[in-house]
Image: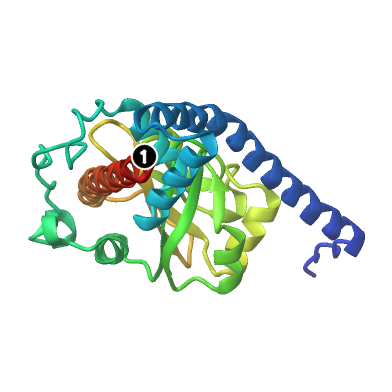
Amino acid sequence: MTDNPAPVPREVAVLREELARLREEAHHLRAQVRTRPLISHAQGILEERYRLPDAEAAFALLRLASQHYNVKLRVLAEAVTRAPRPEGRGSHWLPGPSPQAPPPLDSIGLDASGQADRTDVLRDTLTQTLAVVGAGMGNVQIADPAVQELRIVRHTGLDARFVAHFAVVGAGSTSCGRAAEALELVTVHDVADAPVFNDRDRRAILLAGSRACHSVPLVDEEGICRGVVSAHLECPTKDLHPAQVKALEAVGQEVGRWLGWQERGVVRQALEHLHLLGRQSQDGA
């Protein structure tokens, strides 16, 4: 006779959900506290540089440029504080071509990495990872190092409950979080008894039909984790063959470097747009 676990009372389940929500809210509040001084610094630079009337006007320019290129406000603000000051009233903030060539993407079968689209890169990253592991389920997450979060941007074979549950996770929690934190491949041989998961996360993974997983960090040349790709298997698994590990590490290194290169290029474009907006504000003053 098999013992079935007693059902969790509804009051306890509701309490757990509320605690999870509060933890997430506190996490975002802490991130805002860390980010606010950086944005204020960037506002001051822009206010002085373009002779803006106040900090609100500077924030408006930051927001417009960040939205135009879909760059996080924090990322653009950090670029403003680090980039060299534009020379005079030139039409460009950073004249001349970008000094970096696009990293290769041979590990996922893409030749012209300079013309590659981010969506296609992430799609092929997941496809190659699943092929190497021999899995039918998996997902790709993009990292935000400043707030230590991973966000699912692509997935296959996983149900909607799984995707909603792990839509945003903190670095260090779960196998993907451990991979992002340690900057190395993490293998969970059996989800049912792996200590890396709490009971709530374990249940969500098991309900999705996953009993094992391999999480590969996507790391750029500066050692920054740009994301994580994970492959999920239906049965408990053993360690990967060294050839599989080598192939996955190649994916992690090449795609991580490409994501870093691509983000720097987009940020550069956002800076140029911000410079244009600032010059237009001066002309209209």
Please tell me whether residue 209 is drawn above or below residue 92 in the rendered image. below
Q: Nearer the viewer, residue 81 or 143?
A: 81
Count of numbered tags: 1
Residue 59 visible within the image = yes
Tell me the quarter of the picture where residue 179 sits. Answer: top left
- Report x, y in % for residue 34: 56, 29
Residue 253 visible within the image = no
Please tell me whether residue 280 is drawn above or below residue 133 in the rendered image. above
- Report x, y in % for residue 270: 30, 47
**As drawn, is 80 to the left or to the right of 57?**
left
Q: Nearer the viewer, residue 159 or 4?
A: 159
**As drawn, is 164 to the left or to the right of 88?**
right
Tell me the quarter of the picture where residue 83 sits. Answer: top left
**As drawn, is 21 to the left or to the right of 128?**
right
Please tell me whether residue 84 is drawn above or below residue 13 in the rendered image. above
Q: How is the image coloured?
A: rainbow
In the structure shown, which secondary structural element does the residue marked by tag 1 occupy?
strand
- Report x, y in % for residue 248: 26, 50
Q: Nearer the viewer, residue 140 or 241?
A: 140
Q: Residue at x 60, y 37 (%)?
A: 32
* Residue type, mark 1 in image: Cys
Q: Residue at x 38, y 48 (%)?
A: 227
Tell me the quarter of the picture where residue 155 sits. Answer: bottom left
**Quadrant containing the N terminus in the rendered view:** bottom right
- Report x, y in % for residue 262: 24, 49
Q: Residues within 10 Å of mark 1 (few under 14, many from 20)?
A: many
**Quadrant containing the C terminus in the rendered view:** top left
Q: Residue at x 59, y 65 (%)?
A: 164
Residue bearing mark 1: 225
